[in-house]
Image (cartoon, coloured by chain):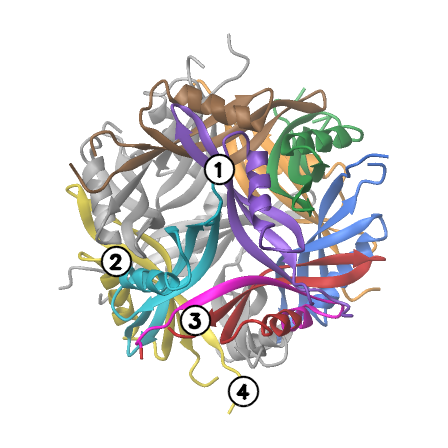
Chain colours: A blue, C red, E yellow, F orange, G cyan, H green, I purple, L brown
């Protein structure tokens, strides 16, 4: 067993009609379908679409860090 | 009719006693009084006032992008 | 009495299982135990831990500005 | 007559199906309909839409500087 | 009366033959001709023209924040 | 059908002997061999090799955003 | 005696009704009441309040570096 | 054979108990298990864990550039 | 016992005649004299003095994160 | 013969009435009059003068890297 | 005579015991001994030494742009 | 004798097969052949070439500050 680990980061954008926090969770839910060992996220950017003078979708760009499984 | 569009961005700061998301919507509500064709926003900065050791107002600086109407 | 004031900033990280906004308030609550005259905060970074494909903790790094008491 | 001048900057996004340089000129052409005394531009961001695996539109965000007319 | 306020920011460049501080005040003086409720400024950039090996004009780019009057 | 979408971004560098715009299209052409649903690109960096005192290759680093297909 | 030294940095905001340079000195004067061995400062941000269309207070955010006394 | 090449970049974090340089090599060793044609790396961030008042692990975030094999 | 924690960050500069890695450890050793519960560091800046055309001292600016003890 | 090389970078601004790409080549042509062994360039900034509501000159700021000849 | 010009930028640090503005002029005065056709400067960084709790020297880092004489 | 000094900065890239620290010293050694009065360096960027899945060369971009000799 190694005494060090390697991690990768991917960049992903989640969206939500309801809140920035839900947009983060939506991104994580989608990423978890194909990525294992996700450990942390970093918010890179927050933006959104406007519909009728209100937020239509919150869009949050994340970096997600996950452990490389055999490292 | 043109095959391209032109957009402008303005910088605006919304505030709310309740949440960062509401501060965003308050900024959009105010901007929509004078700006038409608003399409997207970008969060530039999040800060706020502190009252009695708690958040007094959340203040979110946005850039709002809108289509120039005759472009 | 002086006609100008001096402020200091400290950097602090609050966390919450529930929301980014609560993470901000948790940081302020903790800081208020030892810092007086806190006036504003600035969000520097938003990130968090992932547990079971969802946000485990939101972690928000703030700078908190407070007036130096005898300035 | 003053010995100094004041300038303002606005932020505008031009687009073009053909090139980044044309996107810049399209932004200037649109801005010149309502802004006088434009003197310089600064490219802030270059991006675009993708259609069928190729650039659909180049989108260039500019800041445009213009002299305030009675300064 | 609302319990929150909305602010806008504009970007403006003041200049002065004498000092950076005067360039800031020249920008504010010009802006105050058309903008009401100006509350704060942020220095974005300091530069200038050189004449005969000395500063010809100091040029200071500011963002000026002002309250939207009916918010 | 979901009311929100998830996007990923990859970082890719295209090159061209002829122009920066062609370097962008070369990157998109290569990416389209393995990535579906590409929607937008963002220019991150522009640089190049020099040969005989002229541009040998323009090299443009892009981020490409694409919709995760089943989101 | 060690052949190396350790320094700390604190972040402080000085203000002045008169000039940016005086705001820097006001910050240093206040910091010197509680910090010893201050060696250098770095200007992080310059801004201010506006009163009646002129600068009310210049506000300069500094980092101040000082030697840890027993290092 | 094409007269231009396409490269991709991935973001990876290597760690080491011994040095920042070894953390870089550990990241490359892990990446080389699944990525071919790696040509260069860029250090994005250096940080680490602290154990007993000393560095426990150095953690270096890299971007690794590799040639797309059939470009 | 709380289900969340609060952390603070301080900024410190370590130096070494021998290596950047040792400069980091020297900073941690000094900080550990007065700070408990240090958990991680982030390298903010690397620089140094030059003596006789060689590195005299490596100087590494770190942010050190530590848990607030009663949070 | 050394097993390593040293490079220097200079910062130069090229201009062109026709295109950003030509502005890059004009900068390289001028630099090649006095600099040997130029190997790569990095675009730092793109801006320009406006004449009659169109681009008068594109101005591209480059860093040019060249090998120190006897390294 | 060419219809375009080439400029170079150098980076220089001026200092003054009296003011930031004088530090800028001191840098220009020194640069003008060896550089011709200086046209503009950009302030990159402002810092200084502290002596006895006051500013000892203001140090302003500038980039100076000058026209390449035969371009 | 003047009561202030002027410094210049140059940008240089050192490389080494062995370590980032040696790359820094190699850059300084090369620079010292033509530059006198070098006082400090700042690390701007760290990257390198990859050979056979390991670091081939570490490449460290530095800014080197030196006193202008007659200032």
User: Upstream in the sequence, badge 2 or badge 4?
Assistant: 4
Counting from the top left corner in percent of width and height, residue G46 is at 37, 61
Nearer the camera: disc 2 or disc 1? 1
Q: Is residue I22 left or right of residue I54?
A: right
Callout 4 secondary element: loop
Magenta part of the protein: which range?
C2-25
Callout 3 secondary element: loop
The residue labelled by disc 1 is: G2
- Compute the Cα span from label 3 to label 4: 28 Å
Q: Are marks 2 and 3 on the same chain?
A: no
- Compute the Cα span from label 2 to label 3: 28 Å
- Residue placed farthest to the bottom in the image? E1
The residue labelled by disc 2 is: E20
Q: Is residue F42 something one can see in this rendering?
A: no
- Compute the Cα span from label 2 to label 4: 37 Å
Nearer the camera: disc 4 or disc 1? 1
Counting from the top left corner in percent of width and height, residue G61 is at 40, 61
- Between I32 and H18, the one nearer to me in the picture: I32
- Compute the Cα span from label 4 to label 1: 58 Å
């Amino acid at each position: 067993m190694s005494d060090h680990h390697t991690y990768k980061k991917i960049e992903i954008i989640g969206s939500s009609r309801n809140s920035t926090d839900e947009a983060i969770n939506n991104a994580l839910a989608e990423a978890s379908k194909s990525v294992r060992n996700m450990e942390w996220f970093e918010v890179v950017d927050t933006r959104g679409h406007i519909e009728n003078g209100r937020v239509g979708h919150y869009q949050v760009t994340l970096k997600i860090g996950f452990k490389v499984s055999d490292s």
